[in-house]
Amino acid sequence: MSPENSTPAAGQPDVAALTELRMRALDVITGLPPEVLELGQVFSAAGHELALVGGPVRDAFLGRASADLDFTTSARPDETIALLKEWGDAHWDIGKEFGTIGAKRFARAGRGSGTEIVVEVTTYRADEYDPTSRKPVVTFGDTLEGDLSRRDFTVNAMALRLPQLEFVDPHDGLVDLAAGLLRTPIAPEMSFDDDPLRMMRAARFAAQLGFGIEPATRQAIVDMADRMSIVSAERVRAELDKLLLSASPRAGLEVLTDTGLARHVLPELMLMKETVDEHGRHKDVYQHTLTVMQQAIDLETGPEGPVPGPDLVLRLAAVLHDCGKPATRRFEPGGGVSFHHHELVGAKLARKRLKELRYDKDTIKDVARLVELHLRFHGYGDGGWTDSAVRRYVTDAGPLLERLHRLTRADCTTRNRRRAQRLSGAYDSLEARIAELAEQEEIASIRPDLDGQQIMEILGIKPGPLVGRAYKHLLELRMERGPVDAETAKSDLLAWWATQQD
């Protein structure tokens, strides 16, 4: 370990803090399933080392049982496969190229803990990047200590040898864990050069664990942020998802922007931070965005609610809802500021960004739609919305309505209590009208009073563009006045049809 990277900036934790961590870990470690110790014995009997490593060990010291059981071993992949066949009931080698083999032991009464156990075992390795490649070059190592030195941070570079339960911590990860500090096991420049994605993991762990970043490590991120450009979009997206779905995504996003990583991950967020009005003629778009995201998170529901948290679509929409403001900002005569159509520009930018990050089509469509609709509510408070306008609001939102409710409410960050109460009351009124209309008609799935088959039978026409035009006309009428009986709908259709014959 380099001298400049050897002492936590936050100071050494006191003995009491370390003792507490060890006591927590003891509780978790002694509660490990017997299948884990048995797996260690299988590898040991074959002359190989095996150690529980990374997140599960870190979480044990934090007093949290980990759902993941990740191991590292001296055995090569083919040897690991043979041993996991002996131990488990099923195995898979989809990660064999990187030395990772997975296995599952089914739950059986009278065997071990009696619960299903899933493990992943990876051969000791050292990942290195070619300066021009997006994929790591994997070389297998020979020692546990060497493997741990290639881990991202010291708090993830601790291991538990099995079956003897020997704790291995060559880089003082426990000290950093007690201090709440992220530090690389080797010089940060070397670590981030080997795998630039580790810089983004620093942001993710800041969000997940609430840890700070050791100064030399943070400076290396600032200096090497451009190295992120060689990392594949899929890997970046996976880390961004973990960050956004964490307990405190704001802390992670602040790391991304403060270090410049956001330029390569969410440049729209970086532009919001850089779009500063030094004369204070409008609110800070960046800080507003972070506040909206947190308020949206606070409005997520439990598992049985309409928007169970953590909800990735809602959180992405909150982060990107004002991304169109920098491009649409105009300083008007008289000192005013406008952002005309920033919701439409923002929807296009959000769609483009998420596409580049390789998000699936549904996520892209939903997030962009929420960004596009997030201002639709404004104006309702003036009392000018007809039942038709309410129907259109619900129909345009479709299955995103509950998310739109939360995004719109979260978008109020004014410190003016009276204005905040007025906006909240107006939205309460809108939701009440939606509920009232929903009792009277199927507002959540509005359709014309006649379907396509009925239209063709009444008009005596075959499938084609005319049917679609007739359907659209009846849908417009349905929006305007609500449901009608079949005879009225037929009369309306024939009246429209007569205009088409002229």
Image (cartoon, rainbow, N blue to C red):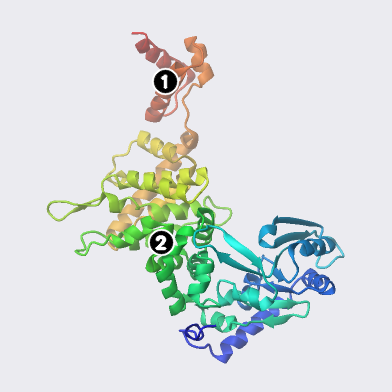
Q: Which residue is drawn at 83% across and 70% down?
A: 42
Quarter holding the N terminus?
bottom right
Residues tagged 2 and 1 counted as in contact (Cβ below 8 A)? no
Residue type at mark 2 is Ala
Quarter holding the C terminus?
top left
Q: Residue at x 28, y 50 (%)?
A: 327
Number of the label disc, if any, that sits on residue 262 = 2
Q: Where is residue 273 in the image (x, y as percent from the top left)?
A: 32, 62
Q: Residue at x 79, y 64 (%)?
A: 79
Q: Give the left or right position of residue 365, taking residue 413 as reference.
A: right
The residue under label 1 is 469
Task: Give the mark toward the camera: 2 or 1.
Answer: 2
Q: What element carries label 1?
A: helix
Between 354 and 424, the residue placed more toward the observer is 354
How many numbered badges does the structure rendering display? 2
Q: Where is residue 48 in the image (x, y as percent from the top left)?
A: 78, 73
Q: Position of residue 373 (x, y in %)?
A: 38, 44
